[in-house]
Image (tube, rainbow, N blue to C red):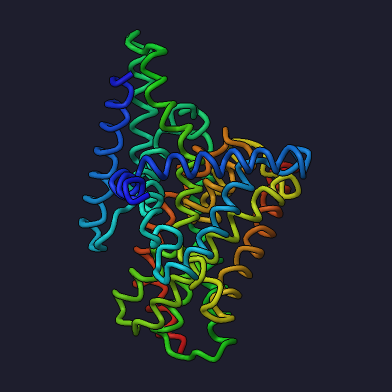
Amino acid sequence: MIYGIALLAFSFLVGQWIGTLLGHWIGIDSNLGGVGFAMIILILTKEVFQRKGWYKPELEYGVDFWGKLYIPVVVAMAASLNVKAAVTSGSLAIAAGIIPVVIGFFVFSYLNKSQKTS
Amino acid sequence: MSELIQVIDSYGLIVAFLVVGIIMFLSDLISKKVFRSKIPGSAIAIFLGLVLGYIGGIFGGGEKGLSDIPIFKGIGFMGGGMFRDFTIVATAISASFLLIKRSGVAGMISLLLGIIIFFTAGVALGWIWGFRDAVTLTTIGAGACTYIVGPVTGAAIGASSDIIALSIAIGVVKTITVTVLTPFLAKRIGLNSESAAMSYGGLMGTTSGVAAGLAATDPKLVPYGAVTATFYSGLGCLICPSVFYLILEYLL
C-alpha cells in the first residue's frame, strides 16, 4: 500500500515541479497546471506499470484511499472558505460571481447539444 | 475539561477527520430521510461545509471560516491546498488515458472559451457597477475567472488592495455557485459523460468548484473535470494581466 502512496507522491511532486518551472519560465510567479501534469504522470505511470506487470491491487489501494478522501477534503475546504466575506462584500461580488456562471451553463448546454447532433 | 481542550488543540488534523466524518454522516442521513436520496449526501455535506464556513466567519472573525476558531483549526489544514491537490491527483488513478487524449483538443478549446466568457462577463458587470479604468476592470474580470487569477492579475498590473479583495470575493462566490448549481443542473445540460466533464471543467475553470460539483453529481467524472480545470487558473494568470489588460487599455 505504501508503494501506491509513494507512486502518487512521486507523480504529485514531479507534476508540481513541472507546473512551477513552466510558471517561472513564462514569467508568472504561480503554478501553471501542476495538478494537471501530476494527474497525467500518474495515469501514464499506471499504464507503464500495467504493461510491465508491476501493477498490483495493493498498489491501487494506496492511491484509491486518497482519491476517496477527496469529498471529505472538499467539505473541509468549504468550511474554511471566507464565505462570510463573499456573501457580505457587496452586490458586485455576488453578481460577478453568479451571472457569468449562469452564462457558462447556457454556453455549455448549447455546445453540448450541438456537439451531439453533429 | 482542560485536558480535553489540550488534546483537541494538539491533534487538530485528527479532530478534523472526526468533525468531517460527522458532517458526512449527518448529510447522508439527511439525504436519505429528507430528500429520499434525490440530492446526493456529498452535495449536502459540501453545502453544510459552506454554512459552517459562514458561521465560522461570524464567530471566528477571520478569513478562513470555521478554521479560525481554535478548536477547528485542523479543518483548515485538512481543506488546505496540500490535501486538496493530493486527493484530486489521486482520483486520476481511475481515469482512462485514452479518453483524456481523445477529448484533449475539445478540452483545450473550452478552456480558452471559458476564460474569455468569464473575463468578458466580469468586465461588463464591473462597467455596469460604474468602474471605468482598465486596471480595476481587468482585476474584476480576472476575479470572475477564479480567486487565484484575480489577485495574481491585480498584483501584476497594480490594482488597489480593496479591488484585489473584491476580485477574491468574486472568485469565491463563483466557486460556491459552481459547487451548488452543478449537481442540480447536470442532467439538464447533458453533463453525463467523461468527455462532457472535460469540456465542463475547461469552461467553468474553478478546480475546487468543478471537482466538488462533479463529486456531488457523479464521482467518476471528477478526474476528467479536474484535469482540464486545473489548467484554467494557470492560463488565466497568463493572459488576463497581459493580452486582456492590453486590449482593455486600448479600448478605454
Residue B81 visible, this angle: no
In the picture, measured across the screen, residue B102 lies left or right of residue B240, that is: right
Which residue is at the far top?
Answer: A53
Q: Which residue occupies 54% across, 91% down?
A: B130
Quadrant of image for the C terminus of chain A: top right
In the picture, measured across the screen, residue B243 lies left or right of residue B131, that is: left
Residue B147 visible, this angle: yes
Q: Is B167 above or below relative to B162? A: above
Q: Is B128 above or below relative to B2? A: below
Q: How many marks?
A: 0
Q: Position of residue A101 (x, y in %)?
A: 61, 63
Quadrant of image for the N terminus of chain A: top left
Q: B27 or B110, which lies in front?
A: B27
Which residue is at the far front?
Answer: B1
Q: Position of residue B200 (x, y in %)?
A: 58, 49
Q: Which residue occupies 46% across, 82% down?
A: B137
Q: A88 or B170, which lies in front?
A: A88
Q: Position of residue B201 (x, y in %)?
A: 53, 49
In the picture, measured across the screen, residue B127 lies left or right of residue B32, that is: left
Q: A19 or B100, which lies in front?
A: A19
Quarter where residue A17 is shown:
top left
Q: Position of residue A77 (x, y in %)?
A: 45, 52
Q: Which residue occupies 39% across, 26% down?
A: A63
Q: Which residue occupies 39% across, 37% down?
A: B89
Q: Is A63 above or below relative to B183? A: above
Q: B44 or B125, which lies in front?
A: B44
